[in-house]
Image (cartoon, helix red, strand yellow):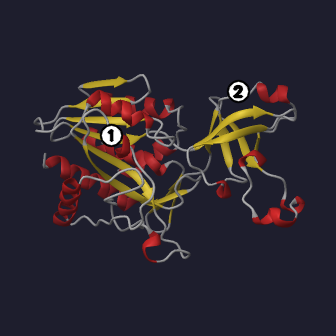
């Protein structure tokens, strides 16, 4: 089940630029099915899988391995860690959250001075990143330097929990869900020859996918992603964007791409014919690896199949497991048509 693969992936740390643990897990899992497999200079894992036939157009499926997190920029005399964010993280949701820092997985907590010490208008403002620090339980710089180095990354550290009616809470559902779907496709066998790109550094500017697309030069790029859901009491109408439980999200546009109209129609028609629930985004926001894939080398036609994820880019992302399974169903159905 996709849920089981996703749980294993979300338990791994892979902040942008430090995706090694995720890449190693995926490589070990898909190696028996790969006709070719390589890790490029940027760290993308590129897997070619032979199918029953060769498609008329070269197809690449892409999902990014990296997650948002922090990167250590300084150590104070008192042993606290200063940091900046890797990727788009909302400062409002990180105070008091646990993090795991560096290759030694040093436990820490993102901290701020107590509310009792906050005065006047300061209470109404979101604290600047420079006001935050990570407490790893050290008393001096020397103690901290034995555990952590500048440039170490830190991942959010939270439990993976199933709750409610088929919901899953975990960090990094964006985009370990896409990686999980691609692993499932590879393990099940594909109907056509496919290139799978498990990419790096999407959260800091879709960097790995540009290199992957330049190397593979696909004519069709299918991106498997997690995307922003906002089905909250505070939002109404189109501001709700999309919602978990309503099926895969098939966007026609986002902040980085206008998706190929023909591919979008093909995917929506396949969903309708297969009884797969689907939705689109009602708000133009975010972006995916499609933004770099579609304009690399000679260009490519791109489409995305996404999962609606609440509280995206936070320590506690929430998605619906049936949406993850339906992403797999729709991706399979599309590959059958090639």
Q: Which residue is mark 1?
A: 293
Instruction: Say which of 112 and 294 sits in front.
Output: 294
In this rendering, the label closer to the viewer, 1 or 2: 1
Q: Secondary structure at mark 2?
A: loop
Q: Quick check: 178 above or below 14?
A: below
Residue 5 on image: x %, y %: 40, 45
Q: Could you tell me which residue is drawn at 13 percent across and 49 percent down?
A: 337
Would you say 34 lies left or right of 9 here? left
Instruction: Say which of 262 and 76 sits in front.
Output: 262
Q: Could you tell me which residue is drawn at 38 percent across and 24 percent down?
A: 39
Q: CA distance from mark 1 to mark 2?
A: 34 Å
Would you say 273 lies left or right of 27 here? left
Residue 241 on image: x %, y %: 43, 67
Q: Could you tell me which residue is drawn at 24 percent across and 52 percent down?
A: 260
Q: Secondary structure at mark 1?
A: helix
Residue 70 on image: x %, y %: 63, 41
Pointer 1 local density, CA inside 10 Å: few below 14, some 14–19, many at least 20: many
Residue 9 on image: x %, y %: 46, 42
Q: Which residue is mark 2?
A: 149
Instruction: Say which of 299 and 317 sits in front.
Output: 299
Q: How many marks?
A: 2
Q: Earlier in the sequence, mark 1 or mark 2?
A: 2
Pointer 2 local density, CA inside 10 Å: few below 14, some 14–19, many at least 20: some
């Amino acid at each position: 089940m996709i849920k089981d693969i996703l749980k294993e992936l979300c338990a791994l740390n892979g902040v942008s630029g430090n995706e090694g643990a995720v890449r190693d897990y995926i490589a070990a899992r898909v190696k028996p099915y790969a006709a070719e497999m390589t890790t490029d200079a940027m760290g993308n894992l590129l897997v070619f899988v032979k199918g029953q036939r060769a498609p008329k157009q070269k197809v690449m499926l892409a999902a990014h391995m990296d997650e948002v997190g922090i990167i250590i920029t300084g150590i104070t005399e008192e042993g606290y860690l200063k940091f900046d964010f890797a990727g788009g993280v909302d400062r409002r949701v990180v105070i008091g959250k646990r993090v795991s820092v560096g290759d030694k997985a040093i436990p820490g907590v993102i901290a701020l001075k107590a509310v009792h010490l906050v005065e006047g208008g300061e209470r109404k403002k979101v604290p600047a990143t420079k006001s935050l620090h990570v407490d790893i339980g050290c008393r001096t710089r020397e103690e901290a330097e034995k555990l952590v180095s500048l440039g170490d990354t830190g991942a959010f550290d939270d439990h993976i929990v199933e709750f409610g009616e088929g919901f899953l809470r975990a960090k990094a559902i964006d985009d370990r869900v896409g990686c999980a779907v691609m692993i499932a496709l590879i393990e099940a066998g594909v109907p056509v020859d496919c290139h799978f790109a498990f990419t790096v550094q999407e959260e800091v500017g879709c960097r790995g996918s540009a290199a992957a697309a330049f190397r593979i030069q696909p004519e069709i790029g299918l991106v498997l992603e997690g995307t922003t859901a906002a089905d909250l009491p505070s939002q109404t109408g189109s501001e709700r964007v999309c919602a978990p439980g309503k099926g895969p999200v098939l966007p026609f546009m986002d902040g980085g791409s206008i998706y190929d109209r023909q591919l979008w129609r093909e995917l929506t028609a396949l969903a309708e014919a297969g009884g797969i629930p689907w939705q689109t985004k009602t708000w133009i926001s975010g972006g995916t690896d499609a933004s770099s894939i579609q304009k690399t080398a000679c260009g490519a036609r791109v489409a995305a199949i996404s999962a609606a994820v609440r509280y995206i880019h936070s320590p506690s992302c929430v998605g619906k497991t049936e949406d993850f399974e339906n992403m797999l169903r729709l991706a399979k159905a599309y590959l059958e048509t090639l």
